[in-house]
Image (cartoon, rainbow, N blue to C red):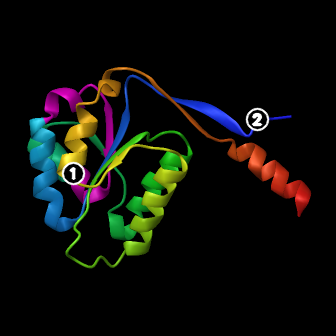
Amino acid sequence: MAQDMITLTIGKQKNIALIAHDNMKRELIDWCKTNEEILKKHFLCGTGTTAKMITEHTGLPVRGYNSGPLGGDQQIGAKVVEGRVDFIIFFSDPLTAQPHDPDVKALLRIAQVYDIPIANNKATADFLITSRYMDEEYNHVVQNFKKNVEDRAHSL
């Protein structure tokens, strides 16, 4: 019988997603410039426009997915589920309504479900990027979702 909880490992080299709402893109680009030496040790991805702008302004290679309103947030969320994103920096704009707000909430929720570190402002991003865990593996215990699906299939 499978365990209810399993241990997942975030590797020494992180898969970091970089996301920013339009009014926050400049702040994220500046943050990436400040933390370029740390970020270049990791694999970077991001939503479309943000990824393109970070690469153009910093030279950091950032794999781009779709723009947030065109499904990019959901693509990043899917990568979290697949174990291919294990750290998210998302500079969200708390003062402007976003047409794709449900997608943003879904991304935040899935990061919580999979116990993925997520920063939604500069202060939190600064704390995370300077954590000792940035240079080492990190083990975290999460619910065994495969077992959960098997149990539900048998009980329904």
* Image quadrant where residue 116 sits: top left
- Mark 1 element type: helix
- In primary-sequence order, the first of circles 1 and 2 is 2
Q: Is residue 71 above or below residue 85?
A: below
Three-letter residue code for mark 2: Gln
Residue 125 relative to residue 111: left or right: left
Name the residue at 49% across, 44% down: 115
Q: Amino acid at mark 1?
A: Lys
Image position of 155 (left or right of 142):
right
Which quarter shows the C terminus?
bottom right
- Estimate how packed mark 2 is, as few (under 14), some (14 to 19) or many (20 or more) residues with alpha carbons within 10 Å: few
Residue at numbered disc 1: 52
Q: Is residue 144 magenta?
A: no
Expressed as whole percent of the image width and height from the top left, the position of residue 28 reads 16, 51
Magenta segment boundaries in residue numbering: 35-51
* Residue tagged 2: 3
Question: In the image, is residue 105 above or below residue 87?
Answer: below
Instruction: Decide which of 122, 37 is in the foreground and name it.
Output: 122
| Residue 33 image position (x, y, % from top left) | 10, 39
Q: Find residue 127 and report its image quarter.
A: top left
Secondary structure under badge 2? loop
